[in-house]
Image: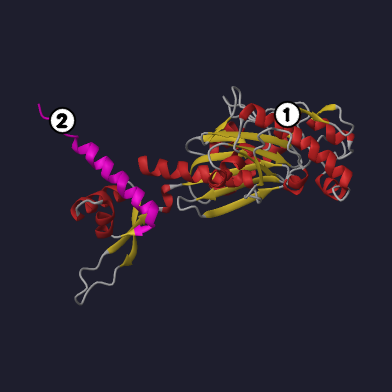
Amino acid sequence: MDPAKPSLALVRAVTDEQVLRALIRHRRLTRAELAADIGISKPTAGESVRRLAERGLVVDTGEHTPGGRGRGRVGSYYALSVNIGSAMAVSIAPEGVVAEGVDVYGTTVVRDHQELGRPARQSQVAAALRDAATEVALTRPVRLAVVSAADPVDRATGRLVHLPDAPFLVGDLDPVTILAPYVVGRVLVDNDVNWAAKAERDHAGPDFAYLHLGEGLGAAVVSDGEVRRGSTGLAGEVAYLLTTGPSGEAVRFIDLFAQLELRQPGSTAIDVERLLERCADADTRRVLGQAVGGVIAALAAICDPDRVIVGGSWGPELLDDIPSPMPRQPVLQAATQTTEPGLTGARAEALSLLAEAIATG
């Protein structure tokens, strides 16, 4: 019995997807170039371009190949329509709310920044998020959004969860509901440390831990290339780990900074400027390094990472002061992404999801 042949509709759908992917890779191509790139006939490429143009996905750019006088026929260049949509990458952090509109080629076409107070209140953050999203949505249709938040994120709902001693947001926040009016499709939310860890994967390999040491404290565990988020999404809350205090006693990591008087007034947020000033003192560096070493020892014992990437505004400063208490100490190295690492990871995910959404319809 002969195997069933694919239907004409299926063949056309596959061809159209290949054409869209080729235009994502190359930005503009003629029908002849599309045929050569994909490995199909010129008439098949031309029919696909016609179908996609009718759907408003592909446009004639008005540009042509030189052609004429022995150089063959003039060819028209085709590209994706600007109306095909963009992705929104969002950062919700103490520095403020940032929303970017990113096209399928990875170009940031619009960026808006809204200031926040400290600590931030739920209503204030929600208003800032709406204002930033409005600016992005004015430029072109937004097909999806990816959000990086400097707070724990509930895995099931995407809501930001307020935990005791969390330094940034007072109250819960629902970015999925807030952004829904501005986005055609999915809104994906995760915490900033997880996104920062994903931004490091190309440099760190498939098995590592990412330790964020800034105004807040956090960690992410990457195993087999995937961030492990835990049953509710709260994995990596290292602020609550027991480590070594200034006098050798056991102390919660977050409480160490209160004992050293390194918190911002009226907050559990770490006073980074003062901490860095105090790091000129060898004893302070020893105490901080010992405490961070205890946190890394806990991560190493439970997760067995190949290396620990240390990021944040003050973590890399202490790399040389962190002791090696484990029999098999993982490699310690500073993060490679130092400017908006959470947003960098979210932007990369948004770009990947956008390309897939455009290609598969």
Count of picture labels: 2
Report x, y in % for residue 272.
80, 45
Whether residue 6 appears in magenta in the rendering, the answer is yes
Q: Residues within 10 Å of mark 2 (few under 14, many from 20)?
A: few
Instruction: Confirm whether residue 122 shows in the render.
Output: no
Report x, y in % for residue 270.
81, 40
Q: Residue at x 82, y 34 (%)?
A: 268
Q: Residue at x 58, y 45 (%)?
A: 200
Report x, y in % for residue 25.
39, 53
Instruction: Confirm whether residue 238 shows in the render.
Output: yes
Foreground label between 2 and 1: 2
Above/below status of 104 relative to 13 = below
Snapshot quadrant of residue 71? bottom left
Most distant residue in the left direction: 1
Q: Residues within 10 Å of mark 1 (few under 14, many from 20)?
A: few
Position of the N terminus by quadrant: top left
Q: Which residues are magenta?
A: 1-28
Question: What main secondary structure does the magenta stretch of the protein show?
Answer: helix
Most distant residue in the top direction: 231
Identify which amino acid the numbered label 2 is placed on.
Ala
Horizontal arrangement in the rendering, residue 53 relative to residue 152 (left or right): left
N-term-proximal mark, 2 vs 1:
2
Horizontal arrangement in the rendering, residue 116 relative to residue 204 (left or right): right
Helix or strand or loop: what does disc 2 sit on? Answer: loop
Horizontal arrangement in the rendering, residue 8 relative to residue 132 (left or right): left
Whether residue 104 appears in magenta in the rendering, the answer is no
The residue wearing badge 2 is 4
Q: Are marks 2 and 1 in contact (CB under 8 Å)?
A: no
